[in-house]
Amino acid sequence: MTLVLLFRAAMSHSEPTSDSAPFLSDDSEVEGPEEQGGAAAEGRQPQEESPSGVSSVRALLTVLILCYINLLNYMDRFTVAGVLPDIEHYFQIDDGTSGLLQTVFICSYMFLAPLFGYLGDRYNRKIIMSFGISFWSLVTLASSYTPKEHFWALLLTRGLVGVGEASYSTIAPTIIADLYVKGKRTTMLSIFYFAIPVGSGLGYIVGSQVSNAAKNWHWALRVTPALGLVAVLLLLFVVKEPKRGAIEAQQDHHLDRTSWLTDLLALSKNYSFVLSTFGFTAVAFVTGSLALWAPTFLLRAAIFSGERAPCVDEQCSTSESLIFGIITCVTGVLGVASGVQVSRQLRKKTSRADPLVCAAGLLLSAPFLYLAIVFAEASTIATYVFIFFGETFLSMNWAIVADILLYVVVPTRRSTAEALQIVISHLLGDAGSPYLIGVVSDSLKKTDSFLWQFRSLQLSLLLCSFVAVVGGAFFLATALFIEQDRHRAENYDPTGETY
């Protein structure tokens, strides 16, 4: 009840000055005036507050807290995948029904993202996030008490988890954008997006290991709610709401909020935003499919090849989720870091570096993912090696895609752009891909033998390689428009905007 009151208070007392903050148009790779031009003044007043209204120390703490919450976000999301074989056995459900667990979550998440994007562009963002994370933690805890006879209740609670996550994912990157610019922004975004693969990997590891230790998969869903409470307290008492767009200040331009319809029309004409969003949709499709099905596929491959005996107990103790989780953590860190570094070096030669690196990551991941799926029955070691390289290349674009959005979209439309990107990428990507893979697997399964349980899932997962190539093509198309769209955003003049 207290959080609800705080939420309402924030809606009626949002800072109007921060929403009309001026905007910087300098496109130099050299750090902006907030890091150079004010050096003399900072010599006299070393503790002077930055234009964002947040001190450098508190800004860094804010990024670390947001990173911690992002880690929890993805850790919770993939805990279910870490114990999926146990859930299938417990509820006696097939692959198509299992895929619904991820689909209902993503659907609620993406449909509510525009609402939170609209609110995030207009009201106090840390209060909105605090409310959402509290709700998400409570619903996740409730889902861990689902009885065997009511699988629909697990679907319902997993769907409601998307409500809380939508409130966070659309807003957090925009706070980082209001704290840093240029090179520092890219660095902080890379730190923030390290939490995606690390959190995903921890979801597999914690889910499988807690389930094995407790001899009950329900306990795997009770870890993140307690950590979510810590996140809410940190948000409320440590994080300070920055002034929107003030860090990019330019005295002759002032940004006023426009209508939601005007924002959508402007974004639809931003080709870099649209094309990079479709490219990211391919990433979401592939990662969503692998996230839910890879541990199960690896387990079936081990059973089919005779490396592991079939599981007939209600609680299946396997190592596939643990190994895949470790690979996901390591490849995610390597992929995000290498993507950012390659992009920085390539920027010295071309301003189209970011979409080109994203395209290369997807196009390089496709053959490795194909080989991982094909070699699963012949060599477990080769399969894990190919997965390692495939996921590393796939992870190269996480921070870069976020950076592209932030520098081709003006500050007052960023939360809406984040929300729209979430809707499109999840609607056409990982909202349906886990369910689609499961349905295709069931349709290809001629019998319920171990052979066809493995073979049908193997054939359906080959779709991921094709989608990765299509995504790479979208990022190559983005490179054609990135320069003009960035220039337009950094020299934005609202008086010249007509629809």
Image: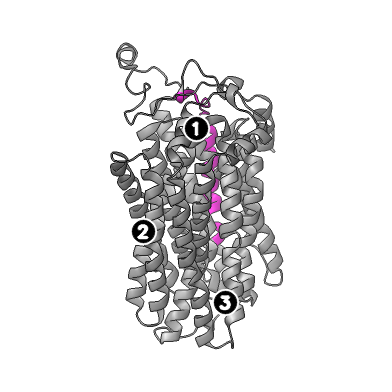
Q: Nearer the viewer, residue 121 or 226?
A: 121
Cα distance between the residues tagged 3 and 1? 46 Å
Looking at the picture, which amino acid does disc 1 mark? Answer: Val
The residue under label 3 is: 441
State the SS at label 1: loop
Query: Which quadrant does the C terminus fall into?
Result: top right
Looking at the picture, which amino acid does disc 3 mark? Answer: Ser
The x, y position of residue 398, in whole percent, is 43, 49
Residue 392: assigned label: 2
The x, y position of residue 349, in whole percent, is 29, 40
The residue under label 1 is: 239
Cα distance between the residues tagged 3 and 2? 26 Å
Within 10 Å of the Cα at label 3, are there few (<14), some (14-19), or many (20+) other Cα atoms? many
Decide if residue 59 is in sight here. yes
Q: Residue at x 60, y 30 (%)?
A: 124
In this view, 14 is above or below 398? above
State the SS at label 3: helix
Q: Nearer the viewer, residue 324 or 233?
A: 324
Mark toward the viewer: 2 or 1: 2
